Image: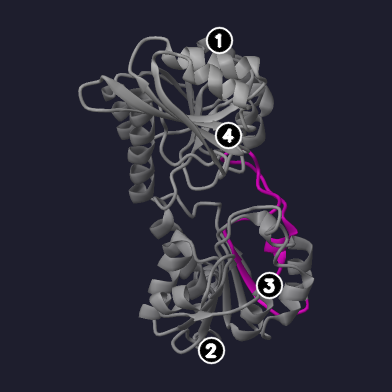
Amino acid sequence: MRVLVADKFEESGRKGLDGAGCDVLYEPELSGDALVEAIARTQAEVLVVRSTQVTRAALEAGRLSLVVRAGAGYNTIDVEAASQRGIWVSNCPGKNAIAVAELAMALMLAQDRRLVECTTDLRAGKWNKKEYSKARGVYGRTLGLLGTGNIGREVAARAIAFGMHVCAWSPFFHDEGAGELGIEHKATPIEVAKASDVVSVHLALKPETKRLVDEAFLSAMRPGALLVNTARAEIVDQASLERAVGRGHIRAALDVFSEEPEAGSGAIDAPIFKLPGVIGTHHVGASTEQAQEAIAAETVRIVRTYKETGRAPNVVNLAQKSQATHVLVLRHYDRVGVLAGVFDGLKRAGINVQETENVVFEGAHAAVARIHLSSAPSGEVMESLRADANVIEAGVVTL
């Protein structure tokens, strides 16, 4: 199996893929048209990426059957185009959770103790102990979480260890789940904003979360509160954030922002970082050695499993429920061509097979097939199936 790695990827991961019997092509600088050309040129079956954009053109350029995002998110991949071509898209959820949680806590503490300003003054030869003795402290403060997935939960655990009260809102999050984590459930994001001294964002980017942190949310935050974003820039309306910080209402600590360069280095001119009360890092939340090694190992596991079984773990683009309306349950002798004949009969009847499963009994004399169908087979079709000497019994279940 040929694997094209189109981003920087740990040596341990490359060796792991090689050890799994893969033909590994490592071209970490690929992007845009060069990626499309490389997919066509190499005819790779598997593509591994981190931050590289995977477009429809790239997905249609060769014979890809699996794309692995070596990280938690997958918004850089055209998942719709992949689904239309039957390409599996997998990711590595949770493997960077501790790294991102550590950075979120670091940003929170750095803002509270004004570490960036302290260091800047020290380097300039300025000593101002009186000014920098005014930290509020985080003990007893309230941390509000937007998102309670792997990362949000790791942040909650660390905040509780610091003696903070934690409240949270997340889609599908409820009181029972909050109780298990030792935190308070809030019914809406605005309730989190009103209750918190610090708000930390840990949501996936989806249409319903884009600009969730907007003018109304920021205005609802407590005066002097801190917004930490180590998730996705698009979740925060940056123009509204600039206004809120500019008028002195809140502060911000950001690992992600709107004007990020596509390359790993380069000049930036982001107005948000020119405002007093804002500190930032270079989209490095997941970038610890521990996290990258864990992600590399998970990527190898995904590709190895796919190579050995034909099914990939952590797939994000499978239908939660097919459009099947009926299931054909077929007991049959385990002989060559039995199912081929069944499928041919369904095809002639204009019935599409949505999903199928065939379980063979001990001794390999008989099997049961469960075939999910787009519509109910007629009595004539059922009679035709039962007429096959290799079919023991056939029935239909309505879904």
Question: Is mark 1 in CB contact (under 8 Å) with mark 2?
Answer: no
Name the residue carrying label 3. Answer: 276
Q: CA distance from mark 4 to mark 1?
A: 18 Å
**Where is residue 306 shown, x and y percent of the image?**
38, 28
| Pointer 1 or 3: first along the chain | 1
Label 2 element class: loop
Residue 195 in the figure: left or right of residue 220: left
Report the Cα–Cα distance between label 4 and label 3.
33 Å
Q: Secondary structure at mark 3?
A: loop
Q: Is residue 364 magenta?
A: no
Q: Within 10 angstroms of label 1, few (less than 14), some, or many (20 or more) residues? A: few
Indicate the secondary structure of the residue bearing disc 1: helix
Q: Is residue 220 above or below residue 35?
A: below
Q: Quadrant of the C terminus?
A: top right
Say what amino acid the circle numbered 1 marks: Arg
Q: What's the mark number on residue 41?
A: 1
Tell me which numbered mark, 2 or 4, is placed earlier along the sequence. 4
Which amino acid does the dot numbered 3 rest on?
A: Pro
Distance of mark 3 from mark 2, alpha carbons? 16 Å
Q: Which is more N-terminal, label 2 or label 1?
A: 1
Q: CA distance from mark 2 to mark 4?
A: 43 Å
**Magenta highlight on residue 264:** yes
Residue located at (43% from left, 79% from top): 179
Q: Nearer the viewer, mark 2 or mark 4?
A: 4
Residue that numbered label 2 is attached to: 134
Q: Nearer the viewer, mark 1 or mark 3?
A: 1
Q: Is residue 38 visible?
A: no
In the rendered structure, which amino acid carries the disc numbered 2? Lys
Pick whichever, 251 or 377, lies toward us.
377
Dot 4 corresponds to which residue? 52
Along the viewing direction, whichever of 178 and 248 lies nearer the viewer:
178
Q: Which residues are magenta?
A: 247-276
